[in-house]
């Protein structure tokens, strides 16, 4: 990331990897070039390799067909004050804190205690966002989040009890697949497979806010599960088709805003792009609201079912505005 590139640049990463391998065994010039291609740019080897082999940087010694590092076990570069300030600032975000345990958080706070904050959370105001976001500070919410975060990479089943929209208490065994964050709703949601419908590959979306219990089960999914294939299978046959006019930097804003969707984008003319966004029923309402937030810079051209949703939403907004602005 650009903020730290002067210290942890790709050139540093390349030399660090070469030295790490050369400390264990001699490294050939060919392998050095491979590392340059993997971690750097096409021209990186033209600058780095000669300085390493000619002894200008005094880091390698020739050893038969390869080169061995003069360092024995080079240390890890320490954090700079700027990096610790960055970390301390992120720790002010309750969503960021969800990814750390109760034991890790005090260590991070102690590590960044003497660093300065780069900004305060109240310095930012989010537009077009609901105010009733998830209770990130709630101990039970944090416990549920950590349980799911632990279970997902291990493919471990979880017993989840949650409150349905109708107020009913529902309990099932789920295989958690993915946690998603909705910026519009300021909420996390879980994509999971109910155990009884595992082979039907029926994905269910659960809001973490409604969870009452989330407990690990001594059950693991042993099958080779292609999660992305399951997601694609749930998409509607036709994607949403958008025409984007690059007004007020609309192209960059839409690409960033819709980065969590699978999409295809191509240039139509000098100032117009077509974007295809693939979605399913669970994404439909939020996608609709997000598209409308761009106003005239984005035009929906298909499918007809989605165009009808856009028109109906605009009619409702017009009626609401008319009633509010000109009460009878």
Image: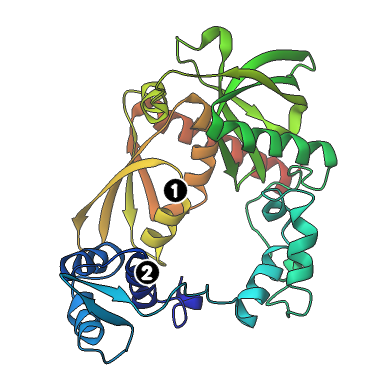
Q: Quadrant of residue 254?
A: bottom left
Q: Is residue 190 left or right of residue 169?
A: left
Q: Residue at x 32, y 23 (%)?
A: 237
Tag in front: 1 or 2: 2
Instruction: Give how far apart the Cα atoms at labels 1 and 2 are.
Output: 45 Å
Label 2 secondary element = helix
As drawn, 129 above or below 289: below
Q: Residue furthest right?
A: 139
**What colour scheme has been applied to the protein in the rendered image?**
rainbow
Give residue 248's position: percent from left, percent from top.
42, 67
Give residue 260's position: percent from left, percent from top.
46, 45
Mark 2 is surrounded, within 10 Å at the Cα level, by few (under 14), some (14 to 19) or many (20 or more) other residues, namely: some
Kindly identify which residue carries mark 2.
23
Which of 189/3 is in front? 3
Which of 222/133 is in front? 222
Kindly identify which residue carries mark 1.
258
């Amino acid at each position: 990331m650009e903020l730290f590139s002067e210290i942890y640049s790709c050139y540093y990463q390349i030399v660090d990897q070469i030295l790490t391998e050369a400390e264990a065994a001699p490294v050939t010039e060919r392998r050095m070039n491979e590392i340059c291609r993997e971690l750097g740019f096409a021209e990186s080897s033209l600058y780095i390799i000669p300085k390493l082999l000619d002894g200008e940087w005094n880091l390698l010694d020739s050893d038969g067909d390869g080169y061995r590092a003069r360092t024995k076990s080079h240390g890890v570069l320490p954090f700079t004050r700027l990096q610790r300030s960055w970390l301390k600032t992120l720790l002010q975000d309750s969503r960021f804190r969800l990814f750390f345990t109760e034991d890790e958080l005090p260590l991070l706070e102690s590590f960044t205690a003497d660093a300065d904050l780069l900004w305060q959370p109240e310095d930012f105001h989010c537009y077009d966002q609901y105010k009733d976001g998830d209770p990130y500070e709630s101990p039970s919410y944090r416990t549920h989040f950590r349980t799911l975060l632990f279970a997902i990479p291990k493919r471990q089943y979880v017993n989840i009890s949650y409150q349905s929209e109708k107020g009913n208490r529902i309990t099932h065994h789920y295989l958690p697949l993915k946690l998603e964050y909705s910026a519009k709703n300021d909420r996390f949601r879980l994509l999971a497979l109910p155990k009884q419908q595992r082979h039907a590959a029926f994905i269910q979306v659960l809001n973490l806010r409604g969870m009452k219990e989330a407990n690990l089960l001594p059950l693991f999914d042993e099958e080779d599960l292609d999660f992305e294939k399951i997601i694609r299978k749930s998409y509607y046959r036709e994607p949403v088709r958008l025409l984007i006019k690059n007004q007020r930097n609309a192209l960059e804003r839409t690409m960033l805003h819709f980065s969590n969707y699978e999409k295809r984008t191509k240039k139509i003319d000098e100032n117009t792009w077509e974007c295809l966004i693939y979605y399913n029923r669970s994404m439909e309402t939020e996608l609709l609201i997000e598209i409308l937030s761009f106003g005239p810079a984005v035009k929906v051209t298909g499918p007809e079912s989605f165009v009808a949703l856009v028109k109906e939403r605009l009619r409702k907004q017009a009626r609401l505005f008319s009633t509010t602005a000109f009460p009878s």
